[in-house]
Image (spheres, rainbow, N blue to C red):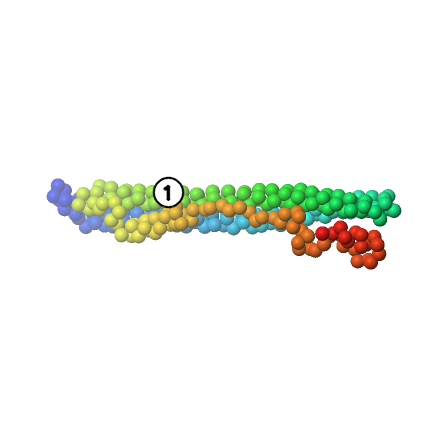
């Protein structure tokens, strides 16, 4: 203890205590910064896992949609074959045109149903991913804000401890160079997640509408024969 405390004499013992307080404060500050790094890394891993799950679910729902659509096509084919077999001679007249129109409309209706269901499934999957990603962005920001507050508290505690050792050892919060460097780096992270990386979700991809399929696969139900019925059938493919 100083021989004349009122004059603010600082002893070597008090200086040593002050240096140790600074070392402890720096250690605590590094622990806070390290915790922030680990938290952000955890959210990064969560985003990667959620993205992988989203991609897998999209593949699954697309395969399911393809299987359902194939089954609907097969059922329509069986129904058409049965009707053709029962109609027989009548198919050489105007009934063929009516039949082709009916099949075309039924095919388009089925396409619309299954494309719409697939679009809804993909929207649900993408929305779930977007929501989780947005939540992680907010969590990153909160972690950075909390780390900033903890570092400022560390500076305040250090200033108080130094003043308690000896008033002449007091340093205003924010002046310790080591802690201030850590605080500045954490503040940069906080600003990044507060401004630059605000997440803006986007619409999921648009699925090809039902009536566009003929634009990529050519005419439907085209027969290769040159007989009257084949020519009649092909005349209704447009």
Q: Residue 153 appears at what percent x and percent y? A: 31, 42
Residue 153 vs 182, above or below: the answer is: above
Foreground residue, 101 or 77?
Answer: 101
Q: Residue 62 appears at what percent x and percent y? A: 64, 48
Q: Is residue 22 left or right of residue 96?
A: left
Q: Is residue 174 left or right of residue 46?
A: left
Q: Secondary structure at mark 1?
A: helix
Q: Considering the image in quadrants, where does the N terminus appear? A: top left
Q: Residue 150 appears at what percent x and percent y? A: 34, 43
Q: Residue 120 appears at what percent x and percent y? A: 60, 42
Can you see residue 30? no
Foreground residue, 25 or 177?
Answer: 177
Q: Residue at x 35, y 50 (%)?
A: 188
Q: Residue at x 64, y 45 (%)?
A: 115
* Residue under pointer 1: 146
Q: Residue at x 26, y 47 (%)?
A: 174
Estimate how packed mark 1 is, as few (under 14), some (14 to 19) or many (20 or more) residues with alpha carbons within 10 Å. Answer: some
Foreground residue, 190 or 63?
Answer: 63
Count of number-bearing discs: 1
Can you see residue 193? yes
Q: Residue at x 39, y 47 (%)?
A: 195
Q: Is residue 198 left or right of residue 81?
A: left
């Amino acid at each position: 203890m100083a021989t004349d405390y009122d004059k603010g004499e600082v002893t070597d013992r008090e200086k040593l205590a002050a240096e140790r307080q600074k070392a402890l404060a720096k250690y605590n500050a590094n622990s806070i910064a390290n915790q922030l790094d680990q938290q952000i890394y955890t959210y990064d891993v969560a985003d990667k896992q959620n993205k992988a799950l989203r991609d897998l679910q999209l593949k699954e729902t697309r395969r399911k949609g393809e299987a359902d659509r194939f089954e609907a096509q097969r059922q329509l084919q069986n129904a058409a074959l049965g009707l053709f077999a029962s109609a027989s001679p009548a198919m050489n007249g105007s009934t063929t045109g009516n039949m082709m129109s009916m099949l075309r409309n039924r095919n388009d209706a089925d396409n619309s149903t299954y494309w719409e269901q697939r679009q809804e499934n993909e929207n649900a999957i993408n929305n779930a991913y977007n929501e989780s990603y947005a939540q992680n962005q907010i969590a990153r920001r909160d972690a950075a804000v909390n780390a900033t507050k903890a570092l400022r508290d560390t500076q305040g505690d250090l200033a108080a401890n130094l003043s308690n050792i000896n008033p002449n050892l007091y340093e205003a919060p924010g002046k310790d160079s080591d802690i201030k460097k850590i605080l500045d780096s954490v503040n940069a992270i906080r600003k990044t997640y507060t401004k630059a990386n605000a997440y803006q979700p986007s619409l999921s991809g648009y699925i090809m509408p039902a009536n566009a399929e003929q634009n990529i696969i050519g005419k439907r139900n085209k027969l290769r024969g040159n007989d009257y019925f084949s020519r009649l059938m092909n005349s209704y493919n447009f």
